[in-house]
Each structure stands twice: as structure tokens, then as C-alpha cells.
Image: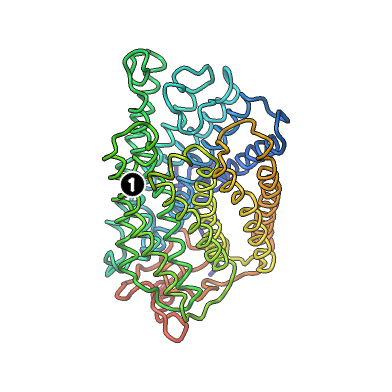
């Protein structure tokens, strides 16, 4: 019998249809929806890289080079909106969560397949509105991705469409989070309790609660800005009795939990890769699982560290500083458990593991410099300098996106049933890793010396730091493009890899690669831990049980 994967068969909201494009964009199969997200997100990611490169070229020398001051403001706003709202926040949950969550818990799909498809259509609508706003009126917003009031109320640029796009993207995020929470509660395989779930599922679960509970706050905030801008009732405008600091509080009440919304699924990726390539049960499984929940809870309470220079009371500063330090404890638990798993493990330094080791280094720098910024005496000097820019990118690019690249290489065989060229993939890693540090590390020095962020121009003494960063930008973009080309060639011509090329233990590796349309012929019974190894080999193989009677 010829094996048919989800590529060959599909379920759509309108039943069978001969048109291939129609079959994809109306498919309710979670795996196809994951691919739809991936295509849109990586297209925007490339656009965001191009915009970022234009800013680096502008800053390569003092004075005006390529962009006017207004164009520069619009460029860093566009870059931020795309990267934060269209790529980093939704990236791992929408792509890898959609594809893998049912596979990891033994389900045939998510709980609400049609709602899942509707979430993608909302995401696409928000993305299209964001792009259209570039060409309507006075161009894209120039406020920065934070849309700070009262400037967002007073600017003549097309803020309304950008706010509308962000609002719609938030709606898509809420629906995805709701779908994931219900799926994890209702569709786990028989015998799989919460402490038999893979740790990536724990990351998705903690993230989903943040999506459901925190995202409505930013939605309300964006609506208030729209009302302020169209009706002028004076919520944030101090000239009308409003309070612009209120906007900052409302924005960061969502946006700091959103940082953990970005990073928790990425931590889950690392927790899958480390035991697989160390060939041993992960150290401290329960501690890592509970720490994900603790990060999502404590993450709601630390937003005030973004407002230390806004005039808040001294006691409020002390409380928010303490809580920011405190959230590093569950984060540290993960790092030490990963390192303990590696200790005396039979480490296989394949490309996914290489990405994980590199990410632990870069994200650790991002985390430790965040602790510096949580220190009250220091943060006043470093606030709104390039030090903050470097910290943010070490955490987001060196953390979330690097972990996304690790996930791409780890689950590539499951997505496509083929293997990429290891030597070329490792070359891409080292190119990106070196370019990344050349790009961002000099900004720590420039920021400590007083270089303000978001400035179109700078004093001549900062030229050397911007030029080193400019060289790093070219290196990292070359590495990213080389990585994408390597993976694309593997999709076309890669060697077939079988169902479990990594000797991993979790359920997605117990089925065919790529998976069948509904994943499992028979739902397995789970009466074991997710990372059982003995003598460097998986203890359990459920393939015959899952495919019995096929």
C-alpha cells in the first residue's frame, strides 16, 4: 500500500477540491496551517532583515547617507513591528506549536481545527494591513513598535492602520492560545498526565495562558489610542488632562509578559534537543516543567522595570527591581538543568545541538545584561542607550530566533522526511554566530559610553562601533541566506532520513516522516516518561503499536 502523507491528502472547510492552492489555504489540517504560517512569517522576516540592513548602512558613517531622519524613524518602526508582532511573538507557537503539539501529545489535530484556520486568516489580514499602511497617507508609523502616546496621537503618519494591524494580530494570538490550552487539556493520549508531557508542550502551555490573559490588555490599549486619535477625548494627552505614563503601564503590562511569550516555547525547544543529543534522560524534568509555569506567572509582575526613569515612587522601583531579579531564578533552573544533562552525557554535536550550545551563550549574555538593567542605580545611566538595544537583541535574536533556528534543524526531517547537508548547516551556524556577535556586542560598549538609541546621527567618536556592527550585519545576513538556501536544497534533493534519524524518544518520532494526514493510525497508551534512554538508546518504540492494522 502506498503511504500517503499530509502533503498528498487534506481536509478543508469546503470538503475536497482539485485546486492545490485552494486545498492549502482552506485546509484545517494543523500541519498545513503550520506551513501557511511559516511561509508568511519567513517572508516578512526577510523584509525585516532588509530594513535593518538599510539602517546599518545609514549609520555606517556619521551624517545622512541613504535615509532622511523621517525615513529612519519609519524604518526602525517597521523593523520592530514586523519582528515583534509578525515573527518573534507568534513564530515558534504558530509554526512548530501548530505542527508538533498534536504529534507530541498523541492527538489527530488541535481541538478546534476551523478556529485554527481562522487564526491564520486573521494573522494574514493583520500582516496585509501593516504592509498596505506603508503606501497610504503619509507612510508607515514613525513611533517605534511601542506606539508611545502622546506622540502616536499627534504624528501625521499612518498610525491608525498600524494599530489596526497590531490589534488583529493580537486577536489571532488569543485564538491560537485558547486552542492550545483546550487541546492540551482535552486531547492528550491515554495515560499521559501533565508530568508525562514533553517539555516543549509545557512551554506552549505556559505561553498559551499568557496569550489568553495578557493579550486583551494590549488590545484595549490600542483601541484607546485609536479613540484618542480619532475623537480626541484626552486619555493620554496631557494637554487635555490625560496621562501618557498610563499608556506605558498598559503597554508593558502586556509587552513584558510577551517577552516570556516569545521565550518559553524557545526554552521548550532546547529541552527537547538537549536530551536527544546527550542520549540521556533530562535532568530535573519536573523542575523545568514547573519553572515554565512560574516564569509565566512572575512575568506578569515585572513590567515596571521599563518605567524606572518615568518618575515612579522609590518603593515601586525597589519592588519591580526585586521581582525582575526574582524571575531569573526559574530561568536559571532551566539553564542549570540543561548543563547538568550535558554533564557526562554522550553528546552528539549535530547542527541542532550546535545551535543550542551557541544559544545558551548568547541568551546568557542577554539575560545577565538584563539583570544589569534591573539594577536601579545603573539603569538610569543606561536607559535609552544602545546598551538596551544590544541587551534586547541578545535576548530576542540570540535567544528566541536562534532557538527557532535550532528547532528548524531538529524537526526538519519530521517536516519533510529528508536530511540537510550537515557540513553546510554547521558553516551557516558559525557564520551567523560570528556575525551576530560582531553586530551587537559593540553596542554594549557604545551604550555604556552614552550612545542613545533610535538616533539618526551620532558623534564621530561612536563611528568605530557602528562600523564594526555594520560589518557584522553583512556577515549575519549572508549566513542566514546561506542557511535558508541549504535547507531549501535539502527539501528538493536531500537524502531520505527515515522516521527517527536522531534516536529521539518523544511521540512525534514514533510515526512516519512526514506524518500521515491524521498523524496516528492508533492512539498510543503512554505509561512512561518522555525522555527514557538506556545505554544511549530510546527505551520505548511504539511504531508497530501506532500503525497496527494499517
Circle 1 Cα neighbour tier, 10 Å, few/some/many (<14 / 14–19 / ≥20): many
Residue 332: % across, % down: 38, 62
Q: Is residue 190 above or below residue 312?
A: below
Residue 446: % across, % down: 59, 44
Instruction: Quickly name the residue at label 1.
Output: 321
Residue 53: % across, % down: 67, 40
**Residue most toward the bottom?**
535
Q: Is residue 217 visible?
A: yes
Residue 47: % across, % down: 62, 39
The residue under the point 41% across, 17% down is 229
State which quadrant residue 64 falls in. top right
State which quadrant residue 505 falls in. bottom left
The residue under the point 65% across, 68% down is 422
Q: How is the image coloured?
A: rainbow
249 horizontally vs 45: left or right: left
Front residue (pair 124, 480): 480
Q: Is residue 19 visible?
A: no
Amino acid at each position: 500500500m502506498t503511504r500517503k502523507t499530509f502533503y498528498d491528502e487534506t481536509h478543508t472547510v469546503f470538503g475536497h477540491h482539485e485546486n492545490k492552492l485552494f486545498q492549502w489555504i482552506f485546509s484545517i489540517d494543523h500541519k498545513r496551517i503550520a506551513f501557511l504560517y511559516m511561509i508568511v512569517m519567513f517572508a516578512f522576516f526577510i523584509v525585516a532583515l532588509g530594513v535593518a540592513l538599510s539602517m546599518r548602512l545609514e549609520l555606517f558613517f556619521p551624517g545622512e547617507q541613504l535615509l532622511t531622519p523621517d525615513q529612519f524613524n519609519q524604518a526602525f518602526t517597521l523593523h520592530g513591528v514586523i519582528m515583534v508582532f509578525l515573527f518573534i511573538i507568534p513564530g515558534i507557537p504558530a509554526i512548530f506549536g501548530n505542527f508538533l503539539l498534536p504529534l507530541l501529545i498523541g492527538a489527530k489535530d488541535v481541538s478546534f481545527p476551523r478556529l485554527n484556520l481562522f487564526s491564520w486568516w486573521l494573522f494574514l489580514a493583520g500582516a496585509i494591513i501593516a504592509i498596505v499602511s506603508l503606501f497610504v497617507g503619509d507612510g508607515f508609523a514613525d513611533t517605534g513598535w511601542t506606539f508611545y502616546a502622546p506622540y502616536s496621537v499627534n504624528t501625521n503618519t499612518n498610525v491608525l492602520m498600524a494599530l489596526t494591524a497590531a490589534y488583529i494580530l493580537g486577536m489571532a494570538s488569543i485564538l491560537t492560545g485558547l486552542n492550545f490550552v483546550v487541546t492540551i487539556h482535552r486531547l492528550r493520549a491515554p495515560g499521559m498526565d501533565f508530568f508525562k508531557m514533553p517539555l516543549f508542550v509545557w512551554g506552549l502551555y505556559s505561553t498559551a495562558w499568557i496569550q489568553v490573559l495578557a493579550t486583551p490588555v494590549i488590545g484595549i490599549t490600542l483601541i484607546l489610542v485609536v479613540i484618542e486619535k480619532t475623537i480626541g477625548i484626552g486619555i493620554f494627552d496631557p494637554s487635555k488632562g490625560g496621562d501618557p505614563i498610563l499608556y506605558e503601564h498598559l503597554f508593558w503590562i502586556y509587552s513584558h509578559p510577551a517577552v516570556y511569550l516569545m521565550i518559553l516555547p524557545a526554552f521548550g525547544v532546547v529541552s527537547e534537543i538537549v536530551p536527544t543529543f546527550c542520549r540521556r534522560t533530562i535532568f530535573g524534568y519536573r523542575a523545568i516543567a514547573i519553572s515554565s509555569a512560574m516564569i509565566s506567572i512572575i512575568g506578569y509582575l515585572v513590567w515596571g522595570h521599563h518605567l524606572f526613569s518615568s518618575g515612579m515612587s522609590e518603593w515601586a522601583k525597589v519592588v519591580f527591581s526585586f521581582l525582575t531579579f526574582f524571575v531569573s531564578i526559574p530561568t536559571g533552573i532551566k539553564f542549570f538543568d540543561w548543563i547538568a544533562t550535558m554533564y557526562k552525557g554522550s553528546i552528539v554535536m549535530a547542527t541542532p545541538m550546535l545551535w543550542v550550545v551557541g544559544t545558551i551563550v548568547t541568551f546568557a549574555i542577554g539575560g545577565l545584561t538584563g539583570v544589569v538593567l534591573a539594577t536601579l542605580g545603573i539603569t538610569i545611566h543606561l536607559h535609552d542607550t544602545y546598551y538596551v538595544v544590544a541587551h534586547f537583541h541578545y535576548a530576542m535574536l540570540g535567544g528566541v530566533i536562534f532557538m527557532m533556528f535550532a528547532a528548524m534543524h531538529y524537526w526538519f526531517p519530521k517536516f519533510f522526511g529528508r536530511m540537510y547537508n550537515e557540513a553546510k548547516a554547521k558553516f551557516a551556524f558559525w557564520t551567523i554566530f560570528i556575525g551576530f556577535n560582531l553586530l551587537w556586542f559593540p553596542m554594549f560598549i557604545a551604550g555604556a559610553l552614552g550612545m542613545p538609541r533610535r538616533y539618526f546621527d551620532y558623534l564621530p567618536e561612536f563611528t568605530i562601533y557602528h562600523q564594526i556592527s555594520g560589518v557584522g550585519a553583512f556577515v549575519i545576513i549572508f549566513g542566514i541566506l546561506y542557511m535558508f538556501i541549504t535547507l531549501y536544497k535539502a527539501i528538493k534533493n536531500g537524502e531520505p532520513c527515515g522516521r527517527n534519524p536522531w534516536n529521539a524518544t518523544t511521540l512525534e518520532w514514533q510515526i512516519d516522516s512526514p506524518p500521515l494526514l491524521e498523524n496516528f493510525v492508533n492512539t498510543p497508551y503512554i505509561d512512561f516518561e518522555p525522555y527514557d534512554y538506556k545505554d544511549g538508546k530510546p527505551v520505548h518504540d511504539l511504531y508497530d503499536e501506532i500503525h497496527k492494522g494499517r
